Amino acid sequence: MSKVDSVTEPAQTPTGETPLALTRRARKMHRLLAQRYPDARAELDFTNPFELLVATVLSAQTTDVRVNLVTPELFRRYPDAQALAGADRIDVETIVASTGFFRAKTDSLLRLGAALVEDHGGQVPHRMADLVKLPGVGRKTANVVLGNAFGVPGITVDTHFGRLVRRFGWTALEDPVKVEHAVGALIPRQEWTQLSHVLIFHGRRTCHAKRPACGACPVARLCPSYGLGETDPVKAAALVRTEPPR
């Protein structure tokens, strides 16, 4: 019996498909999107787990492009957890101000640095249970770090990911943790991190929140939400972004 045949899910699926049909469709959509975005990756700039963790905390309510503009100076001044734990609050606020909510983010970063030093010897832990105990770190951030810094498969349910899997009819759930588990049941575990990148790329470039480019989508014929956006191929192509939004 194949892995697909052995999948066990609730009989009810969002589109009325059988669980087996849904699983096969989801995996085919993933394959097609992976072909469209062969360079899909984390779009935050980092060179080590500490930098990725800090950048991901900063990325809340802003774009990766904006975060990438401020992290070079932040990491130049505070290159590790020890330095961040002892950082000057006003200095950090000034550096990260353009990312929004800078006072709350600065507080999270200073407490994060202190927690890493006090509880983990200044190193970023590589277990979900330890990561989510850190200030400013939830499952989404933890999965980003685990998947991209440590090679531990994880599904990153950000706004793009959640929007797409609901449009695709993979799940009707809204809670990010429930979405993570529902989608994880459809896609092989070893593909979870890349799936996250591919869907986030597609959400940022083609399947936009307000006006998706349906006519330029590689999975249009498999998508139950086809027609929600522009279906004319020429007009849809004009909506496709080649770079992430700023």
Image (cartoon, rainbow, N blue to C red):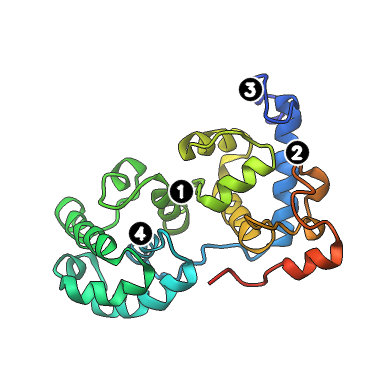
The residue labelled by disc 1 is 152
Give neighbour class at mark 2: few <14, some 14-19, many 20+ (Cα, 10 Å).
some
Nearer-the-camera pick, 57 or 93: 93
Residue 81, compared with residue 118, is above or below; it is below
Q: Quadrant of the N terminus?
A: top right
Q: Looking at the image, is mark 1 or mark 3 earlier in the sequence?
A: 3
- Label 3 residue SS: loop
Give me the disc on residue 57.
Answer: 4
The kind of residue on which mark 3 rests is: Thr
Q: Which dot, 2 or 3, sits closer to the camera?
A: 2
According to the picture, the residue beneath numbered tag 2 turns out to be 25
**Which tag, 1 or 2, sits closer to the chain's start?**
2
Residue furthest top in the image: 11
Q: Earlier in the sequence, mark 2 or mark 4?
A: 2
For marks 2 and 4, give the CA distance: 34 Å
Are dots 4 and 3 in contact, CB under 8 Å?
no
| Label 4 neighbour load within 10 Å: few <14, some 14-19, many 20+ | many
Task: Choose the circle earlier in sequence order: 2 or 3.
Answer: 3
Task: Depth check: give the residue in front, 49 or 232.
Answer: 232
Please state if 5 lies on the left or on the right of 55 as rendered.
right
Q: Is 198 situated above or below 178? A: below
Q: Amino acid at mark 2?
A: Arg
Cα gap from disc 4 to disc 3, whole angstroms: 35 Å
Q: Which residue is mark 3?
A: 8
